[in-house]
C-alpha cells in the first residue's frame, strides 16, 4: 500500500484459521481483506466472536471463479496472500470428491494464478496439511517424509501443495506451503472431533444430551491450538526466501485420550457416555499422525505455546459458556 500500511488478502477468512489470522494481522497494523463466497446465511460468527468483523474488508469472490480472485487481488492490492479457503472436512470429501478437488486443489492454483497475474511480488501462503502424509512412511513426519494421502481431501491438497512449490520454482514467486497438523480452538467447526466432543461434554454436563456417538476413537492426532499456528503462517511470509514447513507439537494423542481429558475436565467419565457408531467410520483412515516441527523452530523461531490439556479445557469452558447462556 502506498501509505506504508501492508495489505493482506485472506481466503477462508470466515473459517477458524482465517478469523485468528485476521486478528493477528490487524494487531500488526495490516489492512486485512477477506474473500467472501456468496452464502445464503451469515457465516461471520467467528469474526464477530473475536470482535473484528467491522475491522476487515470483505470482497465478494469464490475459489471456483478465477475472475473474482483477480478482482480481489486488484481491489485489495495485497502484499501478502493467505490461501486458507477450502472444503476442509475430510469426511465430506468422500461425498463431494470433485467439489473438494476443485476448491482445494484447482482453487489453490486459481489463487496462485491470480497472484501471478496481478502482483507476482506478493508473498503467498498455502494451507497444506498433515493429511498428505496419510499412510505414514516415517514415525515422525517432517518436510522430507513421502506423502501417501488417504482421502479425496488429502489428494486435492497434494495438488495445491505441489502447485505452490511449482509456482515458486517456475516464476520465482515467494510461495510457501505450511504443512500444518491438526489445530483446534473454541472456534473450531462442530463437525471436527475435538469440538464435537467438547460441545457434547458441555451439553451432557448441562443435562441437554445423554450420549455421544463417535467413529474410530483409536486414531491418533498431533493436536495444537489454532491461535499458535496462525503465527507460523505469518512467520513464513516474512522470510527472505519462501520454503515449506511442518507445523506441529511433536506429541500425538488418541481420540480416546482426548475424550478422557474433555469429560474429565467437568468430572465425568467418557466411558459412561461414548458409543461407537459405524456411521462415523471413514472408508480409509489415517491411523496416526506425529509431526516433527524442528525446521519451523530453527528457521522461523516458532514453537507451540498451548498444551493439549490447556486446549481441551479452553474448548470445554467455551462450550459450557455458550450452552449455559
Ligand atoms: P474451516 O474452518 O473449514 O474454514 C474454511 C474456510 O474456507 C471458510 O471460511 C469457508 O467459507 C471457506 N471456503 C469454503 N469454500 C470456499 C470457496 N469455494 N471459495 C472461497 N472460500 C471458501 O477451515 P480451517 O480449520 O480454518 O482451515 C483453514 C485451512 O487450513 C483450510 O484450507 C484447511 O484445509 C487447512 N488446514 C486445516 C487444518 C486444521 O487442523 N484446522 C490443518 C491443516 C490444514 P464459509 O465459511 O463461507 O463456508
Ligand atoms: O478427525 C476420528 C477421525 O475430523 C480426527 C481437518 O482440519 O485435520 C482435520 O482433519 C480423527 C479421525 O480431523 C469421529 O476418524 C472418530 O481419525 O477432527 P477430524 P481430521 O480428519 O484429522 C487435518 C490436518 C486437516 O487438514 C483437515 O482439514 O477423529 N473420529 N470419531 C472422528 N472424527 C469426526 N470428525 N467425527 C467423529 O465422530
Image: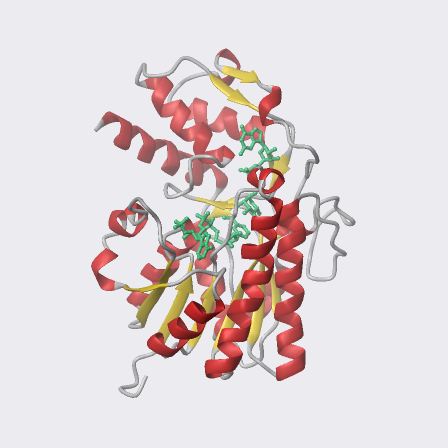
Above or below, 33 relative to 45: below
> Which residue corresponds to the image point at 47% horizontal and 75% vertical from the top-left?
238
The residue at 62%/77% (across/down) is 168
The residue located at (51%, 62%) in the rendering is 302
Q: Is residue 297 visible?
A: no
Q: Quadrant of residue 293?
A: bottom right
In the rendered image, the quadrant that contains the N terminus is: bottom left
| Residue 191 in sight in this render | yes
The residue furthest bottom is: 2
274 over 127 or under it: above or below: above
Q: Residue at x 51, y 20 (%)?
A: 213
Q: How many marks?
A: 0
Coordinates of residue 233 in the picture (x, y in percent): 48, 64
267 to the left or right of 181: left
Q: Position of residue 314 (x, y in %)?
A: 37, 38
Question: Which image quadrant is residue 311 in?
Answer: top left
Question: Front-most of 93 and 66?
Answer: 66
Residue 23 is situated, as x and y percent measured from the top left of the image, at 32, 59
User: In the figure, is residue 156 to the left or right of 205?
Assistant: right
Amino acid at each position: 500500500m502506498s501509505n506504508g500500511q501492508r495489505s493482506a488478502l485472506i481466503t477462508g477468512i470466515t473459517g477458524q484459521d482465517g478469523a485468528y489470522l485476521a486478528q493477528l494481522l490487524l494487531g500488526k497494523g495490516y489492512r486485512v481483506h477477506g474473500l467472501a463466497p456468496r452464502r445464503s446465511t451469515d457465516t461471520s460468527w467467528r469474526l464477530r466472536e473475536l470482535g473484528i468483523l467491522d475491522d476487515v474488508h470483505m470482497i465478494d469472490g469464490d475459489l471456483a471463479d478465477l475472475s473474482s480472485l483477480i478482482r480481489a487481488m486488484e481491489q485489495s492490492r495485497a502484499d501478502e496472500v493467505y490461501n486458507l479457503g477450502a472444503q476442509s472436512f475430510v469426511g465430506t470429501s468422500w461425498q463431494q470428491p470433485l467439489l473438494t478437488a476443485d476448491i482445494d486443489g484447482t482453487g489453490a492454483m486459481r489463487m496462485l494464478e491470480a497472484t501471478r497475474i496481478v502482483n507476482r511480488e506478493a508473498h503467498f501462503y498455502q494451507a497444506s496439511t498433515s493429511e498428505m502424509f496419510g499412510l505414514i512412511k516415517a514415525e515422525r513426519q517432517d518436510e522430507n517424509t513421502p506423502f501417501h494421502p488417504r482421502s479425496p481431501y488429502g489428494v486435492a491438497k497434494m495438488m495445491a501443495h505441489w502447485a505452490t512449490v511449482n509456482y515458486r520454482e517456475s516464476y520465482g514467486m515467494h510461495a510457501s506451503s505450511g504443512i500444518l497438523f491438526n489445530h483446534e480452538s473454541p472456534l473450531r467447526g462442530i463437525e471436527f472431533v475435538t469440538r464435537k466432543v467438547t460441545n457434547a461434554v458441555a451439553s451432557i454436563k448441562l443435562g441437554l444430551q445423554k450420549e455421544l456417538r463417535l467413529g474410530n476413537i483409536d486414531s491418533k492426532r498431533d493436536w495444537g491450538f489454532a491461535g499458535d499456528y496462525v503465527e507460523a503462517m505469518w512467520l513464513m511470509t516474512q522470510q527472505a526466501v519462501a520454503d515449506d514447513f511442518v507445523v506441529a507439537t511433536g506429541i500425538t494423542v488418541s481420540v480416546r485420550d482426548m475424550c478422557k481429558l474433555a469429560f474429565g475436565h467437568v468430572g465425568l467419565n467418557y466411558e459412561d457416555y461414548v458409543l461407537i457408531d459405524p456411521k462415523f467410520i471413514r472408508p480409509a483412515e489415517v491411523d496416526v499422525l506425529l509431526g516433527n516441527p524442528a525446521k519451523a523452530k530453527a528457521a522461523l523461531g516458532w514453537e507451540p505455546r498451548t498444551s493439549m490439556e490447556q486446549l481441551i479445557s479452553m474448548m470445554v469452558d467455551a462450550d459450557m459458556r455458550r450452552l449455559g447462556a
